[in-house]
């Protein structure tokens, strides 16, 4: 089969690899229909995630059809159309029993495209399939559903739920990329009083307005002052950091009101200063986290009911074998105005994999 393989920082290619097969009783083999590219994939290509070994198939988000299952799988069967979650859950360890699947200690967590071969391929082996794939409701398109593999659960759980958004709150979302936009969309489910979006790119601010931001401000135009002006000097009740650089994290700590919540969603590759000399007195709650995807079933129901504007986030579509072009477009988002790029959307005529 064909797959997008990481070889070294700055080196990856769409190339022939061995077909996946069942290795454990809980495995499922999924024929990939639709995938997308995550900012984390770009971090891997840059060398920021050194634990990813050379030869790994990248990707942790997909929609497809189950073609084979191990003897221990009971919730899906061949022919089922499924969402492949970015998080795999063993279902047995302490964290999984608490629904904290992202912290799985039984061999799961974020493993696809990280410590095992991922989804940017014609077929993928999904470990712990009973808890790691989700049958799709009829009427939900593959292009929409693939956004529930990572960005919507991440924005909802790590941003909105960790931030404890409540009716009437002023919510500031710093970073209007895919995660920030999904945070805006899911924050609206809680009827905040005002949502403020901050970004440097005009195209992303326009997207934030379409998705429900009441006020948008360029990050170069004193957003802290605007938040203060809109809140009578108090600051935002909830601030969501969706960029992942020290300057934006520190900006967020200055935007949040005393007693407020700062939810960090951005993936940080460098240290950020925590100014406790200023913050110790403010009674702040600062939350971090890796997505658990425990909310995915609820989000699927909301999508089926038309409550999630997933299609608004997709700016570019490609065939699955145009992976290298799609990475180039997504990696130059400042020039291409790319938000989410989606590949595939139809079944492919590759030969079915054989069992290992």
Image: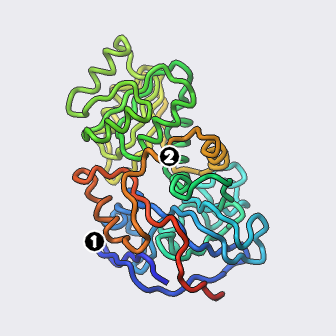
**In the figure, 31 relative to 230: above or below?**
below
* Residue drawn 48% across the image and 43% down it: 288
Q: Which residue is mark 1?
A: 10
Q: Which corner quadrant of the image does residue 50 belong to?
A: bottom left
Q: Which mark is residue 187?
A: none
Q: Residue at x 60, y 85 (%)?
A: 353
Pinpoint residue 78: horizontal percent, then vertical percent: 72, 73
Looking at the picture, how far across and down is residue 259, in whole percent?
Answer: 48, 21
Query: Can you say whether 173 is above or below 27 in the image?
Result: above
Q: Residue at x 28, y 49 (%)?
A: 337
- Report the residue that reaches farthest toward the top: 232
Where does the image place residue 3, in percent across and percent down from the top left?
A: 45, 78
Quarter of the picture containing the C terminus is bottom right
Task: From the top left corner, tell me how far across and down residue 212 is, in percent.
Answer: 44, 31
148 sits left or right of 245 in the view: right
- Depth check, front residue: 111 or 343: 343
Choose between 54 and 195: the one closer to the eye: 195
SS category of the residue bearing label 1: loop
* Colour scheme shown: rainbow
Viewer can see residue 283: no
For residue 9, above or below residue 204: below
Helix, strand or loop status at disc 2: helix
For the residues labelled 2 and 1, the Cα–Cα distance comes to 30 Å
Number of numbered discs: 2
Answer whether labels 2 and 1 touch (C-beta < 8 Å): no
Q: Is residue 76 above or below residue 177?
A: below
Residue 310, label in figure: 2
Q: Is residue 256 visible?
A: yes
In this rendering, which labeled residue sits more in front, label 2 or label 1? 2
């Amino acid at each position: 089969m064909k797959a997008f393989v990481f070889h070294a920082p700055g080196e990856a290619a769409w190339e022939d690899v061995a077909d996946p097969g069942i290795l454990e009783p809980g495995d499922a083999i999924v024929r990939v229909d639709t995938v997308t590219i995550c900012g984390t994939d770009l971090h891997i290509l840059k060398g920021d995630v050194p634990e990813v070994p050379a030869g790994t198939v990248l990707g942790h988000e997909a929609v497809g059809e189950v073609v084979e299952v191990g003897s221990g799988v009971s919730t899906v069967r061949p022919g089922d159309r499924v969402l492949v979650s970015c998080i795999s859950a063993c279902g047995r360890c302490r964290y999984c029993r608490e629904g904290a699947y992202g912290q799985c200690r039984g061999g799961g967590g974020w493993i696809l495209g990280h410590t095992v071969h991922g989804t940017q391929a014609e077929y993928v082996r999904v470990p712990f399939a009973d808890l790691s794939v989700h049958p799709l409701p009829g009427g939900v398109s593959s292009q929409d559903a693939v956004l529930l593999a990572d960005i919507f659960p991440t924005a909802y759980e790590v941003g909105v739920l960790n931030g404890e958004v409540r009716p009437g709150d002023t919510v500031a979302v710093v970073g209007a990329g895919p995660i920030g936009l999904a945070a805006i969309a899911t924050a609206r489910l809680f009827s905040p009083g005002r949502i403020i979006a901050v970004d440097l790119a005009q195209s992303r601010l326009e997207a934030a307005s379409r998705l429900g931001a009441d006020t948008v401000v360029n990050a170069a135009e004193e957003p802290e002052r605007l938040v203060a002006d809109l809140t009578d000097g108090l600051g935002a009740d909830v601030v969501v950091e969706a960029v992942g650089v020290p300057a934006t994290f520190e900006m967020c700590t200055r935007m949040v009101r005393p007693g407020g919540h700062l939810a960090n969603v951005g993936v940080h590759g460098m240290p950020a200063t925590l100014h406790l000399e200023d913050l110790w007195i403010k009674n702040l709650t600062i939350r971090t986290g890796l997505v658990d995807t425990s909310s995915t079933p609820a989000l699927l129901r909301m999508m089926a009911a038309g409550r999630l504007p997933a299609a608004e986030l997709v700016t570019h579509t490609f065939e699955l074998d145009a992976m290298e072009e799609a990475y180039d477009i997504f990696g130059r988002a400042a020039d291409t105005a790319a938000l989410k790029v989606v590949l595939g959307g139809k079944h492919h005529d590759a030969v079915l994999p054989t069992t290992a």
